[in-house]
Amino acid sequence: MVVENTTPTVHSQHAKARSVPIRLHINIDHVATVRNARGTRYPDPLFAAHVCEAAGADGITAHLREDRRHIKDDDVERLRASISSHLNLECATTDEMRAIAERIRPDTVTLVPERRQERTTEGGLDVATQRRDIEAFVSMAKRCGIRTSLFIAPDEEAIKLSHALGVEQIELHTGVYCHACEPGHHGARALELERLARATSLACSLGVEVAAGHGLTRQNIGPVVAIPGIVEVNVGHSVIADAVFMGLSEAVKSLRAAIDRSLA
């Protein structure tokens, strides 16, 4: 069971400095996971995207993995043709994915690390090791008018290198912070929150926009969105989990309400 984060000093200090509204992007991958489990045509990720938009989502995120374990190529094509909000395509730094992104032309392409054996994305992108592949993606994206974002750990070297590569945005991996929100990790939680805050400050000083995501829930998102400089969050698994009990529309609205309460 996830316990609500209670770090009032850090939270209140950050909240006072925030003036920019938070964009909420909903990741619909796990709607496709449920569909694929039975090989049916339902639940349809596109329908889910429309529900999320109607409930107040500012954008839709979909991760087209190399093994196509949830989102399929046809899903991405239908999303691009149908949704009215921002489409954020997450993918690995491969030639295949670069060609797909060039053809589909999402509003943003977020480059993420990917390993076949992982359940979900683990850790941030190794920007230094994959620099050449990232450069090829950034070059294509600039030519096609696509924003590029890198999903990275809140690490100084990774942020500086991301800036040097010319990306418009970074998305900070919040998984370690979210794990620290579990019972008994109060000290680690505060340290991770400060780490995210320092990383955000550095990125903003370099002119790079900052998003955050991975593991965020209604219970732990507050201190993250209160960090000055974070302007977007990507949330998926917890919204779909909440939707099992309250419906997708209400799950999105409840998440938005949690964000708004943290910024009040």
Image: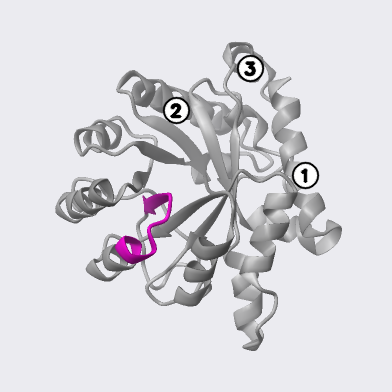
| Amino acid at pointer 2 | Arg
Mark 1 surroundings within 10 Å by alpha-carbon count, few (fewer than 14), some (14 through 19), many (20 or more): some
Q: Is residue 61 left or right of residue 259?
A: left
Mark 2 surroundings within 10 Å by alpha-carbon count, few (fewer than 14), some (14 through 19), many (20 or more): some
Q: Residue reaching furthest bottom?
A: 39
| Amino acid at pointer 1 | Lys
SS for callout 1: helix
Residue at image position (58%, 42%) is 178
Q: Is residue 207 above or below residue 95?
A: above
Q: Is residue 87 magenta?
A: no
Residue at image position (49%, 76%) is 74
SS for callout 3: helix
Q: Is residue 34 above or below residue 92?
A: below
| Amino acid at pointer 3 | Ala
Can see residue 249? yes
Residue at image position (33%, 66%) is 103
User: Circle 2 is placed at which residue position?
Assistant: 195
The answer for how far apart the CA atoms under marks 3 and 2 are is 17 Å
Q: Residue 175: give x, y in percent of width and height.
A: 51, 46
Give whichever of discs 3 and 1 has the lower sequence position.
3
Q: Quadrant of the C terminus?
A: top right
Q: Is residue 43 above or below residue 162?
A: below
Q: Which residues are magenta?
A: 101-111
Give whichever of discs 3 and 2 has the lower sequence position.
3
Q: To which quarter of the image does residue 91 belong? A: bottom left
Q: To which quarter of the image does residue 23 belong? A: top right
Asked if marks 1 and 2 touch (Cβ < 8 Å), the reply is no
User: Circle 1 is placed at which residue position?
Assistant: 253
